[in-house]
Image: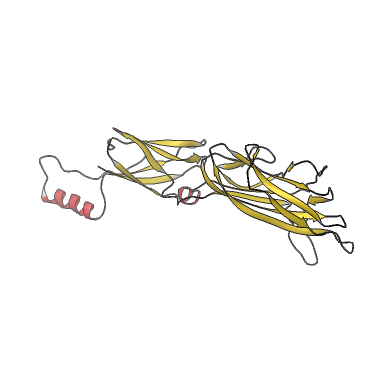
Amino acid sequence: MSRDMYRKLAWTGGDPRQVAEIVNNLVEGKSNNTGEITLATGNATTTTIYDERIGYNSIILLTPISVAAGSDAVPYGAFQSLVDQTIASTTTAYAMTLDTTDYSNGVYLSNSSRMNVRNAGTYNFQWSGQFVNTDTQIQDISVWLRKNGTDITGSAGFISVPNSHGGVNGHIIAGWNYFLELAANDYIELYWYATSTNVSLEFLAAGTSPTRPSTASLITTLNYVSPSASTNVYVSARSKGQATLKHFANNTADKTYGYIIVG
């Protein structure tokens, strides 16, 4: 924690130069009620400001003043699978798996299929899958969500995957999004089944003629539906000489906020 220290008048007053300096500083917004605080890391959800100017009724206003505080504001995660995913039975539900983390802040993989959140709130979950059908008949698939191992009512969707034709496999890319209310440490998974074991999630390597990038078999994103960086940190408690800041689980260094104390 750091803060500015400007000259104050003694109780007996001061000479005209001292009075002019203090008044001019106040007119220019320079006062002794400001400071800086860097949020605790290690997935901490609170940080304490120690400042003798804080009282039980103080109002503390915060604003991000570092790049990390301004940009790394809310929980998010982006993941993908770079392998084929097959099924062995048409009467069994299978978890879609993920093997690559593209971005992660408070949202993470705890195993190959579980997307976990460290912070409670409303999240937007989106997914897309690249399906292939090697059968000569059109086949159907169904995809749905589980939260903490329990199917989410109403989350299932049905898709028909084109049949192979002329020696070319049938392909379709499908996906949609959900809004989810999650508690801290909840996890979600995508499950699916198909009417034929000839249907799978397919990873496609980069191609040539023309040059083109690879295709992930599965892509997911999970992000917090949130206010801005200036409102996701708030004062949850005040006492003489200190205040507790409540914030998202933080594991980012140098997340620094400026503050001003009023009252």
What is the x, y in percent for residue 80? 68, 49
Regarding residue 202, the answer to whether it shows in the image is no
Regarding residue 116, the answer to whether it shows in the image is yes
- Residue at the front extreme? 154
Residue 135's image quarter?
A: bottom right
Query: Compared to 80, does 92 lie above or below?
Result: above
What is the x, y in percent for residue 189? 66, 42
Tag count:
0
What is the x, y in percent for residue 238? 33, 35
In the image, 89: left or right of 21? right
Colour basis: secondary structure
Question: Could you say which is closer to the camera, residue 191 or residue 45?
Answer: 191
- Residue at the top extreme? 240
Question: Could you say which is closer to the camera, residue 103 or residue 130?
Answer: 130
Residue at image point 77% right, 54% down: 131
Screen quadrant of the C terminus:
top left
What is the x, y in percent for residue 112? 70, 40
Residue at image point 73% right, 58% down: 173
In the image, 165: left or right of 98? right
Screen quadrant of the N terminus:
top left
Question: Could you say which is closer to the camera, residue 28 or residue 46?
Answer: 46
- Residue at the right extreme? 167
In the image, 117: left or right of 54? right
Residue at image point 86% right, 59% down: 164
